[in-house]
Image: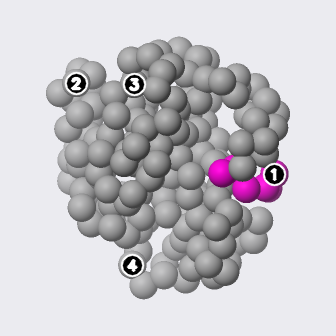
Amino acid sequence: MIRHASVAGDGNSKDSVVRKKILLKHGVDPSKIILGEQTHGINIAAVKSILPNLHPDTDGFMTDLPGVALGVFSADCAPVFLSSMDNKVIGILHAGRRGTAAGILPQALKQFRDKWGVDSQNTVLHLGPHIRKCCYEVDLTQRLLEQAAAHGIPEENRTSDARCTACGGGFFSYRRTKTAERMLSFILIK
Ligand SMILES: [Zn+2]
């Protein structure tokens, strides 16, 4: 079973005390989450152990380790959840305008296939809450879903949260308030 969530309502997840509370509330061991120093790049780490748990210059993660959560921070950028249909491999990406244009999603799908043996036909993709075209001229939703389709993820396996982080309420929005606060998204194999 795979658990995934995007959480903003409990405060700034960049704060380690807040983050610990969020994770405990969601039944995740706070010592077992992998995070990155995100740079809007396309580096994706293959996670084979719990350490290191903070990866420099990394905007995505993949693993097949049960009980190890993969996390990304965002405030308008899209958290992208990936899993194999048999729930044995998972991934998460931080995809904003730059990362999406640079191709972090196609890069992830290539790694899913080459490093983990999961082809796009057997991949499930979900976009967590992000800024939508009502508030942003760059339509991340459309670009990411088009990339997913172009790389062979079946239509029934491509979904997106409908809420906009800028105007939907309850989310941190960099574009709306230039906030330094971030929502946490995570995925793990239970
Ligand atoms: Zn909006």
Q: Which residue is mark 4?
A: 138
Question: Going from the N terminus, do you reach mark 3 or mark 1 first?
Answer: 1
Q: Is mark 1 within 8 Å of ligand 1?
A: no
C-alpha separation, residue under disc 2 versus residue under disc 1: 35 Å
Q: Dot 2: few (<14), some (14–19), or many (≥20) neighbours within 10 Å?
A: few
Q: Is the C-beta separation of discs 4 and 1 under 8 Å?
A: no
Amino acid type of the residue that numbered disc 2 sits on in the rendered structure = Lys
Closer mark to the observer between disc 4 and disc 1? 1
> Looking at the rendering, in which quadrant would you find the N terminus?
top right
Residue 65 sits above or below residue 165 on the image: above
Q: Which residue is mark 1?
A: 10
Q: Which residue is mark 3?
A: 47
Question: Going from the N terminus, do you reach mark 4 or mark 1 first?
Answer: 1
Q: Is residue 143 left or right of residue 29?
A: left
| SS for dot 3 | strand
**Residue 107 occupies which quadrant of the picture?**
top left
Determine which of the numbered discs, if any, sits on residue 115 in the image.
2
Closer mark to the observer between disc 4 and disc 3? 3
| SS for dot 2 | helix
Residue 57 sits above or below residue 25 on the image: below
**Residue 109 occupies which quadrant of the picture?**
top left
C-alpha separation, residue under disc 2 versus residue under disc 4: 31 Å
**Relative to the observer, which residue lies in front, 47 or 130?**
47
Amino acid type of the residue that numbered disc 3 sits on in the rendered structure = Val
Residue 37 sits above or below residue 2 on the image: below
Amino acid type of the residue that numbered disc 4 sits on in the rendered structure = Val
C-alpha separation, residue under disc 3 versus residue under disc 1: 27 Å
